[in-house]
Amino acid sequence: MISFLLNDRITDTPLPPSTTLLDFIRYEADLRGTKIGCREGDCGACTVLIGTLNGNDVKYKSVTSCLTPLANISGKHVVTVEGLNHEGLNFVQRALVNNSGTQCGFCTPGFVTSLCAFAINSTEGSVPEDAVSSVDGNICRCTGYKSIERAAADILERLKLKDHAHPIRWLVENEFIPEYFLNVSGKLKSLSRNDIISGRVPAGGGTDLYVQKPDDAEHLGLMYLADVEDLRNITIRDGICSIGASVTMTELMDNAGLKNAIPGWHSFIKLIASTPVRNIATVAGNIANASPIGDITIMLLALDAVITLRDDSGTVRTLPLKDFYKGYKQLNKKVGEIITRVEFHLPPHNTFFNFEKVSKRKYLDIASVNSAICLHTDGDVIVSAHCSAGGVSPIPLYLKETSSSLTGKRVTSELVKHAFGILSDEISPISDARGSSGYKRLLARQLFFSHFITLFPEQIKMNELI
Ligand SMILES: Cc1cc2nc3c(=O)[nH]c(=O)nc-3n(C[C@H](O)[C@H](O)[C@H](O)COP(=O)(O)OP(=O)(O)OC[C@H]3O[C@@H](n4cnc5c(N)ncnc54)[C@H](O)[C@@H]3O)c2cc1C
Ligand code: FES
Ligand code: FES
C-alpha cells in the first residue's frame, strides 16, 4: 500500500508501485485537469507539484507525472491543478487570463502548476528569467508564448512583496495557493512512509525507463532508489566531491560547492532537459542508461570520475567511469548491482573546465554532439588533461589519446590543432536522426576548438585555428 497526500486528502493505493502518477491521477482519482500529451516528458501537460517533508517545512518541485512511478511519491504531497484552485481563480490563473495566456486551454494546467512552483520557490533574488525558466518544460501550441511571458512578469511583480519569513502564509493570503497548504507539513508527518525497494532493475527518476519501456515497467521488477536516504546527498571533503546515485540534476545544478569550484556549472546543467525533468532525473540514471550523449556522463568523464557499485550481497567495488562502458549500451555491471556513488577531485586552483553541447534547439533537447574538458595547468603548461565527447562513438567517449597528447605541453594554437588531429582518429560518428557523420565530425572539431577559445582567450584565437 502506498500512502500520500493528494491535494488535501490522505490517499492510500494498492496499485503496483510502477503505475505512473499520471494514470493514478486521471483514472483512479478521476482528476482530469492534469492532461496527457506526449507521455515522454516533452510537453509538460501532465505537470504536477510534489512536496517533500524537510524538517517542519515542505519543499515543492514541479515534475512530469507521466514519468513518475507511484513508488516515488510515497509519503509526499501531490498537488494537481485542482489542488491549486481557490473559490475563484488563483493569482497565477488570473495572471494568465488577464494576459491572454490561454487559448484552447490544453496546456494551461501544466503552466499553472509550473508557475505555482515558481511562486512557492521564488526568492528575493528571483529575476524575470527565473519566472520564464520555470515553464521551460511546458509547450503551448496556441499562444506563441509572449502572453505567457507577460503573465510570468506580473506574477514576479507581485512576488516582490512576498514575506520570505512566512512564505506559505503569504502565498495563501495572496491567493496563490489554497488555505489547506498551511496544514500539509503536519499531515505528512502523520503518514507512514514505506521504502519500496522491490525488484532487481534499478530505477531512479524514471525519465529514461518510462520513455524507453512504458508498458514493461510493471514486469521489469523495479528496485526504486530515488528516495533511498544514503544515495541522496552530495559531500565535499578534502577536495573530493562525492555524489549519491539518486541526487537529481536540479540538486547537482544548485549545489553551492560545485558552483563555486566550477565556473559555469549551473549554466552547463541548465542545458539538460527541462525543470520538471531535472527535478526527478538522477545522476546514476544518466550514467547507467549509457546514452552516448548523456550530458552529465560526458561532464563526469572529463572530471575523471570514479563510480562505486554495490551488489545485492553488499559487496562493493569501484572503477573509473571511463571503464564502465564496454560497447553500445553494454556496461561493466552485473545484474542486481547498483551504482551507489560517483566521486571526483574538485578542480583545484589553475584548473579549467568547460562543457559544450549542440542540439537542434538550445533547451529541452538532447545533444547531436557534446564535449567536456578539464585541464590542470602550471603557468601555461598543461599538467593533466581529461577530454570527453558524446555522439561520436557507440559509448560516451573518454578521449584517452587526445588527453595524453595535451599533457605536458604549452597551450598554443599549434597544440590544439595537433590534438584535434588525434581526436579525429579517436571518434567514429555515425549518421542518424541527429545529423550525418560528417556533420558530427565538424561539430566535434568546433566544440574542441571552442573549449580552448573559451578557456584561454588570451592565447587561443579562432582565426589561428580555422
Ligand atoms: C524530456 C526529456 C529530456 C531529456 N533531456 C536530456 C538531456 O538533455 N541530456 C541528457 O543527458 N539526458 C536527457 N534525458 C534523459 C534522462 O532524463 C537522463 O538520462 C536522466 O539522467 C535519467 O535519470 P533517471 O533517474 O530518470 O533514470 P531512470 O529512468 O530511472 O533509469 C535509467 C537507467 O539507469 C538505470 N539506473 C538508475 N539508477 C541506477 C543506479 N543507482 N544504479 C544502476 N543503474 C541505475 C536504470 O535501470 C535504467 O537503465 C531526457 C529525458 C527526457 C524525458
Ligand atoms: S504527457 Fe507530455 S510531459 Fe507528460
Ligand atoms: S493554449 Fe492551446 S496549447 Fe496552449
Image: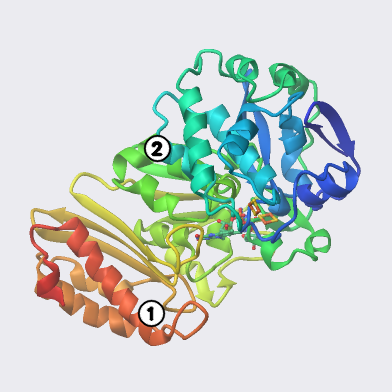
Residue 401, located in which quarter of the rendered image?
bottom left
Name the spot of residue 150 as percent of width and height, x first.
49, 39
| Residue at left offset 53%, top offset 54% | 144
Going from the N terminus, do you reach mark 1 or mark 2 first?
2
Image-based side of 381 in relation to 442, left or right: left
**Would you name the residue on which mark 2 appears?**
236
Label 1 packing within 10 angstroms: few (<14), some (14-19), many (20+) = many
Q: In the image shown, does 429 or 297 lie closer to the viewer? A: 429
Name the spot of residue 277 as percent of width and height, x first.
58, 51
Vertical placement of residue 104 versus 132, above or below:
below
Badge 1 marks a residue whose secondary structure is helix
Vertical placement of residue 117 versus 274, above or below:
above
Vertical placement of residue 143 versus 251, above or below:
below
Of the two numbered discs 1 and 2 in the rendering, the one whose residue sits closer to the viewer: 1
Number of marks in the rendered image: 2
| Residue at left offset 24%, top offset 63% | 451
Badge 2 marks a residue whose secondary structure is strand
Identity, as a three-letter code, of the amino acid under mark 2: Ile
Name the spot of residue 273 as percent of width and height, x first.
52, 56
Residue 409, located in which quarter of the rendered image?
bottom left
| Residue at left offset 69%, top offset 43% | 109
Image-based side of 412 in relation to 234, left or right: left
| Residue at left offset 51%, top offset 58% | 364
Label 2 packing within 10 angstroms: few (<14), some (14-19), many (20+) = some
**Would you name the residue on which mark 1 appears?**
440
Identity, as a three-letter code, of the amino acid under mark 1: Lys
Residue 60 visible in the current orientation:
no
